[in-house]
Each structure stands twice: as structure tokens, then as C-alpha cells.
Image (cartoon, rainbow, N blue to C red):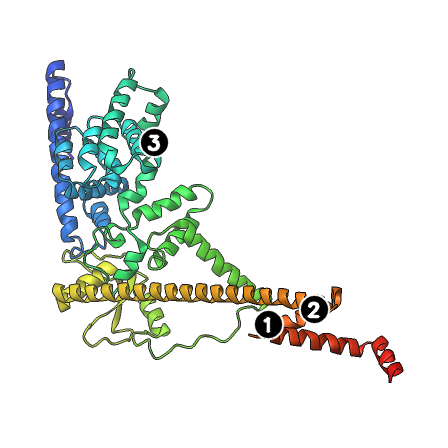
Amino acid sequence: MTRHEKGDLMRDYSLTHLSDTVLIRDLHTLMAQERGTAAAVLAHLAEVDARRLYVPLGYSSMHGYCVEELRLSEDAAYKRIQAARAAREFPILFTELAEGRLHLTAMCLLAPHLTPENAEELIRGAACRRQSEIQDLLRACAPAAGCAQGELGASVEDLVGQLAAQQVGVGDSTELAAQQVGVGDLPELAAPQVGLGDSTELAAQQVGVGSAEGGLAAQQVGTGSVLSSVEQLVPLMVRPETRDRLRYLQALLSHAIPSGDVSQVLDRALDLLAEHVEKRRFGTGNGPRRRRTAERTRYIPADVRHAVWNRDQGRCTFEGVNGHRCNSGSFLEFDHVDPRRREDTVQGLRLRCRAHNQYEAERVFGTEFMKRKREEARRTAEKRREEEAESRGRASNEGATARAKTSIENSEVEEQIRDVLSALRQLGIRGEQARRAAAHARALPAATLVDRIRAALEFHGECVMRSPRAARALYASG
């Protein structure tokens, strides 16, 4: 850049020549324009996200597209994605942002709590409020605070009045200091900003190519917030190389642990380490290996999977129309180069993330075909879950019936034993002899009272005859 160009640049951004009135007026004008532009940007992001236009460009998630293509920071991408999705569902948020009644952080705070029933009241209650006031409002309106869903509107109005009454000057200096440095509750927004969804739903959507719909699927947003959780849990305690290995584990386990929860990843890693050490030290776990059955028709040999993984370096190989390679390491799947022939060879397979595996399948077989297949798989999974639940219910009912039957039978047996003891006492058999005879009668399966009394008397008679004293008496009488 020449000296002349630098001089022009300084003149463009040097405002010393403006009067105070003009400076303030221009600032307000620019802020209004910025808010309108921000609303328009969110509208565009929401539409790009809904159409999944980032996929053919070589990105596995909307977050990756925002960070790499649009050059947003990770936190800015999280916030804008969440705000855009919330505003797409509740368009009033676009207007509130454009007119300055809500800021971007307020939209992110409100987004996880908005429903068709409470959206209008919550948005109106949060208008022109500071971040701390909105947080207080949401905490007070939480179900745990005793605010019923039908009473939310009145509660919001009452709380807004209380917040207004509590405003004295600029508020607490400590609270302002925390907000100025950007701490506050921002880390709590990580999960809502990403919108990972339910892992069960994600598992149900894994039909070879994933799901084309499903709104806030994890692969559509990326694992940025998941990886940032590593920084929150182990910020300075370990070396950077260790944090990188933990991130790599999160990517490898993205199918089994879609949320990327660090605690679950560490639990699994520690379990495997303990099993490995136990095998080496104590020789455990050396039993016969489970053999694969013929039902696994889609099984890819281990050596082929290993070769493909090494060749593709554990990354998605999709290249977008602009030449950008995806390189995603999460939700990876083995994709057939020719999906019609489906050759399970190193040359016939490649690594693709779920988003691009799905995109390629839709390109080859058609969107409607894949949508129908996913719907069939979803219904099959639901039916299987229902059958399993019914089976568990039947087993539980059968068990309860058996227990009840056993209880009834036991009570009947105990009642018969009481009658047996009473009969023995009337015949002059008492104490330990009577108890031993009754215990012998109790052991009879499904016997009547008469049978139990007869068995008790026979047992008592045999015991008497076996005693030396009885034998001597019998010999003397003979």
C-alpha cells in the first residue's frame, strides 16, 4: 500500500473534522443501519441453513461454512446460527433485532425457551432489557420456579415491572465488569447455540446416509462447541497435544456419542484403558471371540476399512463445486464410490461425513427416493422400539403374575403348616419334634392338608423308631 493510499484510508476513518452533533447523529444512523443489516444477514443464514447449501460447497455443517467461508469466529458463528434458526421459527425476532429492541445475545438467551404459546410474551418482556435482566426473567419463568405454562404471560409482565423497579443507576459494578470482559453466562450458551439434538433421534436417522431433514441435526452445525467444551474442562491442566487427542477421540466417537460429551468420552477411554491393562497384567478377557453371523450382509472387512481410513487420513473426501474439500473428522461413514455396484474394496470405498454421504445418495438416487427410505427406516425403528417395549411390558407382567401366584401359594402352604402343627399338638407331639415334622411336611410340593399331616406323622414315627431309647423300649415290650 502506497503512502497516498494510506493517507486516503486514514481520511476515511478519521472523524476529527466532524462536530459533536454530526458525530452523534451519524453514529445513530449507522447503528440503525447495522441492526437492519444484522437482521438481513440472519435471514440469509437461516435460508442457507434450511436449504443446506453449504453441503455442495464442501462443508459438512453450517458452522464450518460460517467459520471457514464467511470468516466468522466460532462464537459469532454459534450465536448467528442459533439466532437465525430461532428467528426463522419466530419471524418477530427479525423485526425486534432490526428495530433495536433486542440484541443478538438476547435472541440467543431466549431461543431455547421460546414456544408458540409463550414467544410473544417473552419477546415483549425481554425488549430493551440488558443481558442480566433477561437472565433473571428466564430464571424466574423457569418451570422449577413454579411458573405454569398457562400463567407465563402474567408472570412476565409482573417480572418486567419488578426489574424496572430494581433499576438504580447503572446497576452493580461487579456485574458490569463481568459483562464487559465477556464472561457472564456465555459458556452456558454453547449447547443451545449448537443445537445438537437428541442422540436417539440421530441414531434413528443413521440409514446409510443419515437424514435430509431433522432441523438441528448435529452434523449440520458442526462440533465446534463440542470441541470448545474440552477447553472448558481441561484448559491448562494438560498439554495442547493431549487436548488435541481428546478432540480426536470426540470425532472418532461421534457416532456412539453424538453430543461429544467430554465426560462420556473420558469414561469410555478409561474403561478401555482399564480393560487393556487388566488383559496385560491379569490375563483377563481372553475368552472365545464372538463370531459374526451371516445376518451382517453389509459388513466391510476390517482390513479394507483400515486401508481406506489410512488412505483418506480419517477425513471426509468430498470436494465442493468450488474445489473446497470437506475434511470433516466427525460422523464419518464408509461410502461406496459406485453405490449401485457396492464393491467392498479399497478402491470401491471412500470416507464421507454423514452430510455428504447423504448428499451423494440423494444426487444418485433422488431426493424423494432417499426421503422415502429414511421414512421407512424411521417407522421400522419405531416399530422395533414399540415391540421391545411391549416385550418388556409382557415380561414384567408375567413376572408380576408369577410373583403374585407364588405369594398366594406360599400363604396357602403356611396356613396348612399351621394346621399341621395344631394337629400334632393335639396328638401330644410338641416342641422341636413337632417343628421338625412340620418342616418335613412343608417340603411336599402341591400337597393337600391331609397329605401334609400324614407325612408329618410318618416322619415323626420314623424319628421315634430310629432313637436308641425307643428301640430299647420296643425290645423290652417284645
Dot 3 or dot 1, earlier in sequence: 3
Q: Where, by quadrant of the figure, is residue 116 drawn?
A: top left
Q: Which residue type does callout 2 highlight?
A: Leu
Neighbor class of circle 3 (other Cα within 10 Å; few <14, some 14-19, many 20+) is some
Q: Position of residue 205 (x, y in %)?
A: 25, 61
- Asked whether the beta carbons under mark 3 and mark 1 sit within 8 Å of each other, the answer is no
Q: Position of residue 374 (x, y in %)?
A: 20, 64
Which residue is depicted at the point 16% across and 63% down?
371
Q: Position of residue 105 (x, y in %)?
A: 24, 34
- Compared with 231, 19 (above or below) is above
Q: Give the farthest residue toward the right.
A: 476
Q: Which residue type does callout 3 highlight?
A: Gly
Q: Is residue 414 left or right of residue 221?
A: right
Helix or strand or loop: what does disc 1 sit on?
helix
Neighbor class of circle 2 (other Cα within 10 Å; few <14, some 14-19, many 20+) is many
Q: Quadrant of the C terminus?
A: bottom right
Tell me the tag on residue 128. none
Residue 414 or 299: which is nearer the viewer? 414
Residue 60 or 130: which is nearer the viewer? 130
Helix or strand or loop: what does disc 2 sit on?
helix
Dot 1 or dot 2, earlier in sequence: 2
Residue carrying label 1: 449
Q: Give the farthest residue toward the bottom.
A: 478
Residue carrying label 2: 424
- Compared with 74, 340 (above or below) is below
Residue carrying label 3: 184
Q: Is residue 375 left or right of residue 464?
A: left
